[in-house]
């Protein structure tokens, strides 16, 4: 049961984080490239930087979803209904 709940929640969040990274990476690359053109000494931004950033974002999203899914799965629904 916990794994099913985790899988349902994780799928949605990983999909959203992936879409966000795919949209943000080209924009960030373009803005960083145009900003760095002003300097005499500059570096080139390569794709591994964006791959690491995207992977880190997905891992953080999975850890967050995992924590909340486990809390929700082991909680007693009767206790929650009593509070509300």
Image: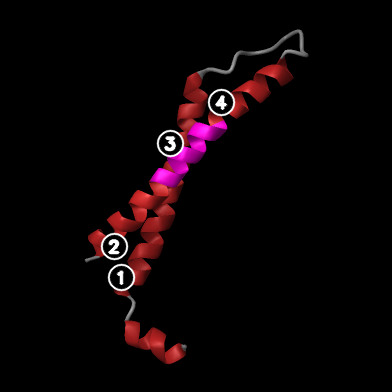
Residue 53 appears in the picture as rendered: no
Contact flag, marks 2 and 4 (Cβ < 8 Å): no
Marker disc for residue 73: 1
Q: Is residue 1 above or below residue 49?
A: below
* Rendered position, 52 above or below 59: above
Q: Which of marks 3 and 2 is in front?
A: 2
- Horizontal and vertical percent position of residue 74: 30, 73
Residue stretch in magenta: 15-24
Q: Which of marks 1 and 4 is in front?
A: 4
Find disc 2 in the rendering and name its residue. Answer: 5
- Examine the structure image and report whether residue 37 is included in the region drawn in magenta: no
Residue occupied by mark 4 = 26
Query: Looking at the picture, how far across and down is residue 71, in whole percent?
Result: 37, 69
CA distance separating discs 3 and 4: 16 Å
For label 3, the residue is 55
Check disc 3 and report its element: helix, strand or loop: helix
- Mark 1 and mark 4 lie on one chain; the one further toward the N terminus is 4
SS for callout 2: helix
Query: CA separation, marks 2 and 4?
Result: 33 Å
């Amino acid at each position: 049961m916990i794994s099913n709940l985790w899988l349902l929640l994780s799928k949605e969040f990983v999909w959203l984080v992936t879409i966000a990274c795919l949209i943000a990476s080209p924009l960030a690359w373009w803005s960083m490239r145009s900003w760095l053109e002003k300097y005499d000494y500059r570096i080139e931004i390569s794709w591994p930087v964006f791959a690491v950033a995207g992977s880190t974002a997905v891992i953080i999203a999975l850890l967050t979803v995992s924590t909340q899914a486990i809390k929700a799965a082991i909680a007693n629904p009767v206790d929650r209904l009593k509070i509300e």
